[in-house]
């Protein structure tokens, strides 16, 4: 077990990539605090973690609100006594719209959840990681943050901001033996991607199936990455095997961003 005795907070842990990471961490011996706005989903995942023999609990939290974040961290410290790993996974897809048609409130919501939430959660756990002189912070970015992302500008901009934040925090936290990295997936199979395909279909008049086929064609492997594959990278970055890696934005895309 690569994470035996470790304590992890996984935001957005009730579904999708966050759920996959939480279960992978539990498999590797970690106790897990799960945070999201949907209490029912995080409590269901917490039960699955408990069935694997690890301690777990769910805490409803909106990461864009400082009070919720501080409560999440305080409850984790109260139950587990320490925090070794933070996975800033929670994020929203935002609107599918050209910049000219963008609604200000939709832009602001994406920035508040995706970017500000990453900062608030990191800030809160650093207050405990710095005194213990150890920790791993793993941010979920996207290839949408390293290239133009037509009709998805707030999402792309928020992820680009996460990339910069990751590298900056790695420099600031490194002297305390705290590692900070970002996982940058391309499209990932699951309910969220299906929703995005539906939105793109409505906006462009192309069927979701045609959009999915087009995405697969951009991968040299002819595939779309799975949630389990992303979770395995998150295990690696949380483990001692990644002891020489910090401040990195690591793509896991099946080659999507280099496809033609």
Image: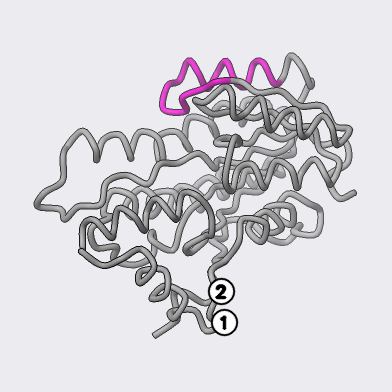
The label on residue 117 is none
The label on residue 254 is 2
In the image shown, does 120 or 52 lie closer to the viewer? 52
Q: Position of residue 245 (x, y in %)?
A: 68, 60
Cα separation between marks 2 and 1: 6 Å
- Decide: few, some or many residues near mark 2? Use Cα within 10 Å; few <14, some 14-19, many ≥20: many
Tell me, yes or no, whether the highlighted magenta stretch contains residue 73.
Answer: yes
Highlighted range, magenta: 60-76
Q: At 34% across and 67% down in the image, what residue appears?
A: 147
Pick out the residue farthest to the left: 100
Find numbered disc 1 in the image and state the secondary structure of the residue it sits on: loop
Q: At 42% across and 69% down in the image, what residue appears?
A: 212
In the image shown, does 168 or 201 lie closer to the viewer? 201
Q: Most prominent secondary structure in the magenta stretch?
A: helix
Q: Which residue is mark 1?
A: 221
Q: Name the N-terminal-most of marks 2 and 1.
A: 1
Q: Is residue 55 above or below residue 153?
A: above
Q: Quick check: marks 2 and 1 in contact, CB under 8 Å? A: yes
Q: Position of residue 36 (x, y in %)?
A: 54, 29
Q: Position of residue 145 (x, y in %)?
A: 38, 59
């Amino acid at each position: 077990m690569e994470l035996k005795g470790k304590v992890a907070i996984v935001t957005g842990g009730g579904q999708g990539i966050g759920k996959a990471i939480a279960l992978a961490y539990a498999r590797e011996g970690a106790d897990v605090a799960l945070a999201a706005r949907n209490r029912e989903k995080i409590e269901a995942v917490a039960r699955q973690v408990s069935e694997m023999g690890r301690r777990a609990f769910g805490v409803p939290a909106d990461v864009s609100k400082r009070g919720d974040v501080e409560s999440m961290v305080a409850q984790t410290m109260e139950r587990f006594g320490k925090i070794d790993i933070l996975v800033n996974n929670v994020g929203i897809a935002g609107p599918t719209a050209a910049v000219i048609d963008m609604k200000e409130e939709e832009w602001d919501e994406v920035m508040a959840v995706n970017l500000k939430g990453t900062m608030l959660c990191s800030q809160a756990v650093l207050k405990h990681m710095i005194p213990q002189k150890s920790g791993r912070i793993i941010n979920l970015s996207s290839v949408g943050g390293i290239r133009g992302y037509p009709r998805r500008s707030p999402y792309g901009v928020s992820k680009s901001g996460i990339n910069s934040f990751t590298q900056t925090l790695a420099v600031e936290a490194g002297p305390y033996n705290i590692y900070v990295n970002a996982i940058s997936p391309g499209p990932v199979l699951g309910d969220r991607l299906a929703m995005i395909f539906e939105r793109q279909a409505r906006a462009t008049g192309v069927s979701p199936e045609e959009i999915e086929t087009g995405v697969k064609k951009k991968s040299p492997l002819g595939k779309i990455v799975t949630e389990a594959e992303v979770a395995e990278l998150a295990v690696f970055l949380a483990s001692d095997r990644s002891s020489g890696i910090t401040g990195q934005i690591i793509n896991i895309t099946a080659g999507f961003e280099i496809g033609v």
